[in-house]
Amino acid sequence: MAIRYSVTTAHKTELSERAAKIAPIKTVIPAPEHQVRNRPGRKPSTKSKHLLTLRLDPDIIEYFRSTGEGWQTRMNDALRKAMEP
């Protein structure tokens, strides 16, 4: 038969105080080298962009995708050009 222990408020307070004194693991053990090096990917842009769901005709999407990598940027440029007076 298992023995049950009751935890009093004093015990909880003591445990909380002890836990607060424990240093985060990142400050005690350095990260492995493979996590420290630069991560691959695009650098953050200085101009923020917004994620948007947009419905377009299939032939428009097919046209821009057929132009290869960077098609979304080209589509953005085409929309920007359409804004010009």
Image (cartoon, grey):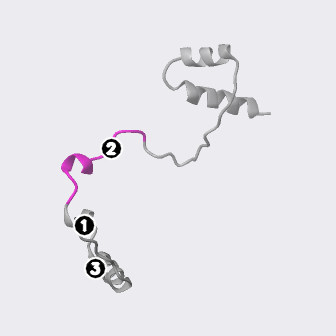
Q: Name the foreground residue: 30 vs 1.
A: 1
Q: CA distance from mark 1 to mark 2?
A: 21 Å
Residue 79 at what x, y percent from top left?
69, 30
- The one nearer the camera, 33 or 2, is 2
Mark 2 residue crowding within 10 angstroms, few (<14) / some (14–19) / many (20+): few
> Dot 3: within a 10 Å radius of its alpha carbon, few (fewer than 14), some, or many (20 or more) residues?
few
- Percent position of residue 36, x then y: 25, 51
- Name the residue carrying label 2: 39
In this view, the mark in front (1 or 2): 1
Q: Secondary structure at mark 3?
A: helix
Residue found at the far right of this picture: 85
Asked whether the residues under the numbered discs 1 and 2 touch, taking CB atoms below 8 Å apart as contact, a structural biologist would say no
> Residue 53, relative to residue 25: is it above or below?
above
Residue denoted by label 1:
27
- Say what amino acid the circle numbered 2 marks: Arg
Region of the chain picked out in magenta, as a range? 30-42
Furthest toward the bottom, the residue is: 10
At mark 2, the secondary structure is loop
> Residue 39: x and y, percent?
32, 44
Disc 1/disc 3 C-alpha distance (Å):
17 Å
Q: Which residue is mark 3?
A: 18
